[in-house]
């Protein structure tokens, strides 16, 4: 179908983005810090955010007659907002704990991967849409960059959770 591959693509990316936000809240819980939302509310907000990010491009194209490039730009901006919210929640918690400097290099690397992926995607609009260059897998390079960023973000989360667990273990030992 016209939307099948695109919806599968953006749905997976939206789920990854909201997972970052959910992991940030779980990190706060692991540190015994107050969370922003209850676990039920978090799930509802995550589902609504992912749904809105996916529905935006569909509405832009189907209801408002946006061009394919405009539709992609609606998705790209939704994706950027989802990533930023999740990462900022995590960074705020790290800042509160005085561990922000530990994670900055990895976060910068993750952002660099996303920026490189966006560059590859923008090259699609410049080179492939007009038909002048269609034999290089630019969109696949976007996915390689996004997957690399996801790996880095997951590594940051695992490192943070391990540090929180060590801290909780040290607290138990003091009692």
Image (tube, helix red, strand yellow):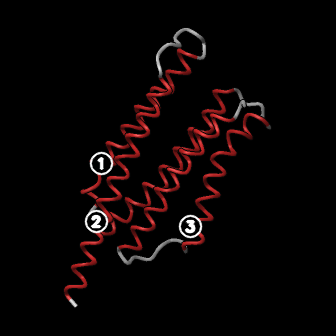
Residue furthest to the bottom: 175
- Mark 3 touches mark 2? (CB < 8 Å): no
Per the model, the C-alpha gap separating discs 1 and 2 is: 16 Å
Q: Residue 106 carries which label?
A: 1
- Mark 1 touches mark 2? (CB < 8 Å): no
Determine the image quadrant of residue 42.
bottom right
Task: Say few, some or many: other residues with alpha carbon within 10 Å of mark 2 (under 14 / 14 to 19 / 20 or more).
Answer: some
Image: 97 above or below 90: below
The x and y percentages for residue 51 are 66, 52
The residue at 80%/38% (across/down) is 63
Q: Residue 162 carries which label?
A: 2
The residue at 58%/59% (across/down) is 46
Name the secondary structure under disc 1: helix
The x and y percentages for residue 64 are 78, 35
Residue furthest to the right: 63
Question: Which one is earlier in the sequence, the residue at label 1 or at label 2?
Answer: 1
- For the C terminus, the quadrant is bottom left
Name the secondary structure under disc 2: helix
Question: Which one is earlier in the sequence, the residue at label 3 or at label 2?
Answer: 3
Task: Say few, some or many: other residues with alpha carbon within 10 Å of mark 1 (under 14 / 14 to 19 / 20 or more).
Answer: some
Task: Say few, some or many: other residues with alpha carbon within 10 Å of mark 3 (under 14 / 14 to 19 / 20 or more).
Answer: some
Per the model, the C-alpha gap separating discs 3 and 2 is: 22 Å
Q: Is residue 140 left or right of residue 75?
A: left
Q: How many labels does the image show?
A: 3
In the image, which is nearer the foreground, mark 3 or mark 2? 2
Q: Is residue 58 left or right of residue 107?
A: right
Per the model, the C-alpha gap separating discs 1 and 3 is: 25 Å
Residue picked out by circle 3: 42
The x and y percentages for residue 4 are 67, 35
The residue at 29%/51% (across/down) is 104
The residue at 50%/50% (across/down) is 16
């Amino acid at each position: 179908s016209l939307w099948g591959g695109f919806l599968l693509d953006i749905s997976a990316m939206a789920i990854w983005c909201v997972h970052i936000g959910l992991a940030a809240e779980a990190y706060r819980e692991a540190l015994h810090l107050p969370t922003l939302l209850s676990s039920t509310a978090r799930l509802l907000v995550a589902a609504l955010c992912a749904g809105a990010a996916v529905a935006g491009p569909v509405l832009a194209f189907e209801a408002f007659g946006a061009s394919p490039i405009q539709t992609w730009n609606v998705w790209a901006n939704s994706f950027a907002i989802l990533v930023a919210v999740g990462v900022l929640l995590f960074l705020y918690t790290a800042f509160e704990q005085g561990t922000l400097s530990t994670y900055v290099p990895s976060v910068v690397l993750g952002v660099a991967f996303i920026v490189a992926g966006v560059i590859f995607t923008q090259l699609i609009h410049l080179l492939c849409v007009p038909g002048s260059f269609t034999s290089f897998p630019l969109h696949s390079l976007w996915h390689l960059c996004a997957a690399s960023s996801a790996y880095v973000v997951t590594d940051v989360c695992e490192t943070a959770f391990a540090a929180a667990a060590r801290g909780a273990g040290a607290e138990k030992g003091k009692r």
